[in-house]
Image (cartoon, helix red, strand yellow):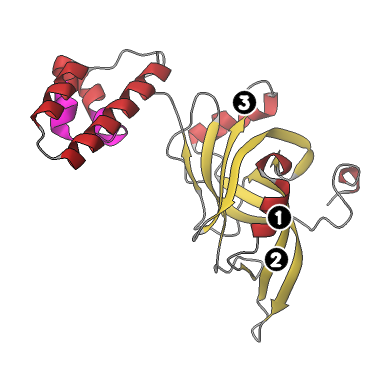
Amino acid sequence: MAAAATSLLPASYATPRIVTPLDLKSVDDDGSFEGYASLFNREDLGRDVILPGAFRDSVQKRGASGIKMLFQHNPAEPIGVWDEVREDARGLYARGTLMSGVARAREVLALMRAGALDGLSIGFKAEKARRDAKGVRRIEKIDLWEISVVTFPMLPEARVANVKRRPFAGNIPTERDLERWLTRDAGLTRMEARAVVRDGFKGLKALRDMSVDETMDAALAARIRAVAETLALSG
């Protein structure tokens, strides 16, 4: 870490490890996105493998708010906040929001949407690790300080899953556009999507009333609510 960073991060802070590229599918107008900052049991280009459970204590101790969101590991350039950081069976999942009031964050958002910026990376201290016979460092416990949006990743498989965009923002969709969005992004079947396009939510209600399967009926009702909430956001 550069000397200028020592006033913002502790001396024990490790050289950041670039771990994951973003898998950009969509970006929300409010700058929110989600994905994996690290994947378990995958060897990166630095010959590190992070084991399941490595982040658990640190995430519990700091919480999402205690883990910084930086640009290119630069402690002088915070660009947003992490709303959720947790371990699951795959790795370290992170969901965050870029701050629209920060010039660099607006630039990052534009680059994400263009597909020009597609990496995530963690900055950490390895608290417990061992090297195997092949020289690979297997990290069992990590003190996680920050997750950065970066340009070049070391672990290509781990990516941001979603950077969400409100549908049709600033544009009036055609019927075909609306039907495509309802099936692709809102989770409706083609029949349900056509019912919405033709008759609005009354069309969906008619389909629901025709259902004799309570499980299917409940699932359809949940989709109706999700569509209504999403369309309300785009208004």
Kind of element beneath mark 1:
helix
Q: Where residue 141 appears, x then y in whole percent?
A: 70, 66
Near-viewer residue (156 or 192): 192
Q: Residue at x 52, y 41 (%)?
A: 34
Of tags 1 and 3, the one toward the viewer is 1
Which range of residues does the magenta coloring cover? 180-195
**Dot 3 alpha-carbon crowd within 10 angstroms: few under 14, some 14 to 19, many 20 or more:** some
The residue labelled by disc 2 is 141
- What is the chief secondary structure element of the magenta stretch? helix
Q: Where residue 171 appears, x then y in whole percent?
A: 36, 14
Q: Is residue 143 left or right of residue 195?
A: right
The residue labelled by disc 3 is 106
Q: How far is the residue under mark 2 from the one under mark 1? A: 8 Å
Near-viewer residue (26 or 86): 86
Q: Residue at x 14, y 20 (%)?
A: 203
Kindly identify the amino acid type of the residue bearing the numbered disc 2. Lys
Q: How far is the residue under mark 3 from the one under mark 2? A: 34 Å
Residue 189 in the magenta stretch? The answer is: yes
Residue 35 in the magenta stretch? The answer is: no
Kindly identify the amino acid type of the residue bearing the numbered disc 1. Ser
Residues marked 2 and 1 touching at CB (< 8 Å)? yes
The disc, 3 or 2, on the residue closer to the chain's N-terminal end is 3
The residue furthest bottom is 133
The disc, 1 or 3, on the residue closer to the chain's N-terminal end is 1
Of tags 3 and 2, the one toward the viewer is 2
**Dot 2 alpha-carbon crowd within 10 angstroms: few under 14, some 14 to 19, many 20 or more:** many
- Which disc is residue 58 wearing? 1
Where residue 218 sits, quadrant-wise, is top left
Kind of element beneath mark 3:
helix
Near-viewer residue (73 or 34): 34
Kindly identify the amino acid type of the residue bearing the numbered disc 3. Arg
